[in-house]
Amino acid sequence: MPTSPTPGGQTIGSPVAALSQTACADRPKLPKPLLVFWWAVTVAWTVVIFVLSTHSFGSDYTQSFLARLLASVRLQVSLPTLHFLNVAIRKVAHLSEYGILALFLYGPPEQGRVLWKPRRAIFAVAAAGLYSLTDEFHQIFVPGRGASLWDCGLDTLGASLAMLLPFCGHQLRLLRQTRTVSGM
C-alpha cells in the first residue's frame, strides 16, 4: 500500500492518519456562531438549574405555588395528596432539567440530523451527573435546602434517559435508510 506524508508529517494510509481523519470527522460541522450560541445556551441552562436550587425554589415554595394553582382551577386536594403531588413534580423536574442539560451537552444536530455518538453520550451523562453533584453540594449552604444523593441519582437517570432521544433518532434514520435501499 503506497503511503505519502501529510502536511502534519503523518503518512496517508497509516493508523495515525486514519485516527486523525476519524477525529476530524467527529467534530460538529456547524458554523462557529451557531456553535457559540449552542454552548452559551448550555451555560445559561446551568445557571437556570443553579437558580432553581436556591431558597426561593424550595419545597415550601413549590407546594404553596401548587396549592394556589389547584385553587385557581377550583380543585381541592387533601394535604397528604398535595404533599405527594409536590414531591412527584419536584422529582420529575430533576429528571427533566438534567435530561435537558445532557441534551445540550451532547451537542447540536449536525447538518440537520441527529447522529448517535456513544462517546459523546457518555460524556454528556457524566458531565450532567458531575454538575448534579456540585449542585447538591451548593444546596448544603442554602438555608431551607439540603443535599441528597437520591436527587443526584435522579438527575443522572434523567440525563441517561435523555440520551435515548439521539439514539432512537439515529436508529429510526438507519431503519428508513435500510427500507429505502431494500425498496420497501
Image: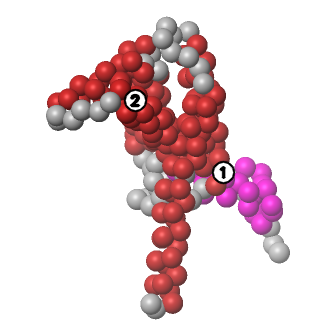
> Is 129 on the left-hand or right-hand side of 60?
right
Residue found at x 35% / y 19%: 61
Badge 1 marks a residue whose secondary structure is helix
What span is colored magenta in the figure?
Answer: 8-28
Q: Is residue 121 visible in this depiction of the protein?
A: yes
Residue found at x 44% / y 61%: 113
Residue 80: image tag:
2
Please identify the residue farthest to the bottom as the structure is shown. 183
Give the colour scheme of this rendering. Answer: secondary structure
Residue 10: percent from the left, percent from the top? 78, 55
Q: Nearer the viewer, residue 93 or 31?
A: 93
Residue 83: percent from the left, percent from the top? 40, 28
Quarter of the figure with residue 34: top left
> Is 2 on the left-hand or right-hand side of 154?
right
Please give the residue where the numbered disc 1 appears in the rendered image: 119
Q: Is residue 103 magenta?
A: no
Residue type beneath disc 1? Arg
